[in-house]
Each structure stands twice: as structure tokens, then as C-alpha cells.
Amino acid sequence: MRLILASQSPRRREMLSLMGYDYEIIVSDADEHVPPCAPGEFVEKLALRKADAVFASHRDCCVVGADTVVYLGGQIIGKPEDEADAFRILRMLSGRTHTVYTGVAVLTDTQRIVFHDAAEVTFSPLSDEEIRAYISTGEPLDKAGAYGIQGPGSLLVERLEGCYFTVIGMPNPKLYRALRSVGMLPKWMIHPDGMRCDVAALGALSSYQYVVVLSEYEGKLLLSRHKERKTWETQGGHIEPGETPLQAAQRELFEECGAAEFELVPICDYHAEDSASAANGVVFAAKITRLAPLPESEMAETRTFDKLPDTLTYPGITPCLFAEAKRQGYFPCVAEA
């Protein structure tokens, strides 16, 4: 699935690149007029409007839209109209604490995630001479609140409470969690063999080769340790000829962890690929109530975990599938890695 940034902001482009994502840029032409409302709601509406304008013609992609404003004294402050307006805004911010709001929308064909983050910024008292000198750099003219905290404008700031990236215009930690929940991982988090994974709605794919089972036992995640690889793995594997995905999941559960009594629910499809091959599969969530002795198989033992361990066989695919399971309400007591 392609990732599209619906923004012309150089700062947002830079931050998405620094996070490690491959993406395309398609600038949104959305109407940015929003009726008066609370600042958090304001930036969410604009971010969603920008993303929707691009998503309408790219529905097979993941589209990210964002918007940032400054809020002070009940007033939402956007970009200055000109140098005189920048001077007015900076004089108003001088020696005072304001709040920066950044809204983000992440859209795919199955999910719409919209959120905002806020940070408080306190300016030092500024002289008119300092304000004019700063405006002469050209930095204030294309930024909400007429300043950029990552450039010369950093000298205007006395204190910051909250996420630095939110002030720049992209709350990276929250954006990463949103992108991860729709199956988009940065390049450095993808398995070394180049494996990528895209989550799809249940029944979206026409054929399947694999099943993956995410298992819960006594309120924890149950994983199996492979004899040769010595890694902790989810249960699952090939769908054998003549098997349905459900039958394959039932067989793999018994063979790889000795599950004797369990509930099994399909939750989503997935497509995984690397430079050499590609395959489709179904993800199941299993709630195991009784384990039998582990049968003779490739697995040496089983163990329960409070969170995903770092030594999974497929760290590029399992966190993606587990995040989708968490989004659907499974594994409430298990933390993501």
C-alpha cells in the first residue's frame, strides 16, 4: 500500500522522511475555511478535509493529512498574511504562553484515524528590533503563529511543554502509532529480508496460502519457540491442499502449542511480500482455555508474554498483525512491543 502525504509543508516532508517512511506527495486543494470551533476540533477537521481531498482519487493508498495552528486568548492564529501581520502576531506572542495544536488524519480503505496533539510554548519578551530582525529571515511568513521552532525562531522560545514535533507540525510518535495500526511501517522496522505486510478487511482477498494465529492463554499472548531458529513465534503456517483456512488454523494450533480447547475467530486478511515472493493469508485470534502436552513438532516449548518480545521470527509482519488485532479489541492485557 502506497503512503501519500497530502501536504506541501517542507517540515512535514522532512519529518516523515526522518521517521523512515517511503511516501509520495500529492498536495491537497481542499477548502480550508472551517466555521469557528475549539482549536483541537478545528485542526482535526482541516486535517481530515485535506486527506479526504486526496483520498477520493487514491482509495487504494494510505493518505496522511495534517494542519497546525497557534491558540492564544481564545483566538486561533494561522499563517500571517504578510510581514505586517507577522509583526502583529509576534508582538502578541511576546512574553506569553500559547498553545500549538496539530491535527492529523490517516485514511485507508478500511480505517479513518483522526486525532490531534497540543503543546504549550512560552516566548521570551521580544523587542520590536528582535521581531523585525526575525521577520527579515523570511521564516515566519509560511508558518502558523509566524514562527518556526526548528530554525532561528527557536531563539524566541523560553520554554516548551509537550511534544517538540507537534510544534513543528507533525506529532511523530502519535503518527507512527496510527500508521502502524493500518500496517504502515518505516523502512528500518521492516524485516531484513525486505518483508512488507498490508492488512486488509476480512474476505477482501480472493485466495490464501497461509494462516497466522495470535493466541491468548490466561490473559497473555501465547507464543511457541522453534527448535532450530530459537525464536518465539505466533502459530500458523501453510494451508494444506483441501484445507480451509479455519481447518489449517485449528491444525497449526494443536501442532505448534498443544491447544486442546479454544475459540477461534478470523479477524482480517493480510498480504505479505518481499523481493522474491508474495502471499496472502488470514489472521485468526484464538482464546485457548486448555493446553495439552506439546506434540512432536518443530516447536520446543510454549510461553506466555505480557507484550510482544523482540525475538520474533518475523518482526516486520507480526507487530502489524498484532496491532490490527488490538484495534479490533483483542488482547486487551497485552502490550505492543
Image (spheres, rainbow, N blue to C red):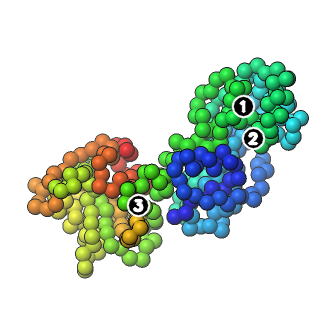
- Report the Cα–Cα distance between label 2 and label 3: 38 Å
Q: Is residue 237 left or right of residue 189?
A: left
Find disc 1 in the rendering and name its residue: 153
Q: Which mark is residue 194?
A: 3
For the point 14% across and 54% down, the residue is 300
Quadrant housing the C terminus: top left
Q: Nearer the viewer, residue 224 or 87?
A: 87
Please tell me how crowded label 1 is: few (under 14), some (14-19), or many (20+) other residues with Cα within 10 Å.
some
Q: Exactly how many numbered labels are in the figure?
A: 3
Query: Disc 2 vs disc 1: Cβ atoms closer than 8 Å?
Result: yes
Give the x, y percent position of residue 253. 22, 61
For the point 77% across and 56% down, the residue is 31
Q: Which of marks 2 and 1 is nearer the N terminus?
A: 2
Q: Is residue 226 above or below residue 39?
A: below
Q: Is residue 103 visible?
A: no
Three-letter code for the amino acid on which mark 1 is drawn: Gly
Three-letter code for the amino acid on which mark 3 is drawn: Gly
Find disc 2 in the rendering and name its residue: 143
Q: In this view, does 74 lie to the left or right of 220?
A: right
Q: Name the secondary structure under disc 2.
A: loop
